[in-house]
Amino acid sequence: MGIVNIEDELHDQLRKASTVTCRSINAQAAFWIRIGMLCEMHPTQSFNEIVTRELRAAGVEPPPARAA
């Protein structure tokens, strides 16, 4: 584990985002770092495609679709 220096404004945004996503500030920062890295590594994929791929790789299955 290490310490990362970030600007106060970014830390404030992390705090706000972590409240919305029910993550700790550290977990929110780790999520942003991981997804940002994956976006740079796969520039032709959208954010949603990357998150979907990561969820599937973790074994998360979408619920069955309900008929309207």
Image: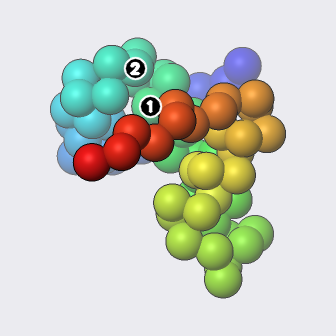
Label placed on residue 23? 2
Quadrant of the image occupied by residue 31: top right
Query: In the image shown, does 8 or 36 lie closer to the viewer?
Result: 36
Q: Which residue is mark 1?
A: 28
Identity, as a three-letter code, of the amino acid under mark 2: Arg
Q: Which quadrant is home to the N terminus?
A: top right
Helix, strand or loop at label 2? It is loop
Proximity of marks 1 and 2: CB atoms separated by less than 8 Å: yes
User: Where is residue 9 shown, x and y percent of the image?
Assistant: 22, 46
Q: How many numbered marks, from 0 up?
A: 2
Of the two numbered discs 1 and 2 on the same chain, state the one appearing first in sequence: 2
The residue positioned 33% from the left and 19% from the top of the image is: 22
Q: Is residue 4 visible?
A: no
The residue positioned 48% from the left and 23% from the top of the image is: 26
User: Where is residue 2 shown, x and y percent of the image?
Assistant: 67, 24
The residue positioned 40% from the left and 16% from the top of the image is: 24
**Residue 65 shown left or right of residue 9 in the figure:** right
Helix, strand or loop at label 1? It is helix
* Residue 12 vertical placement versus 37 (above, below): above
Identity, as a three-letter code, of the amino acid under mark 1: Gln
**Residue 25 shown left or right of residue 41 in the figure:** left
The residue positioned 52% from the left and 32% from the top of the image is: 63
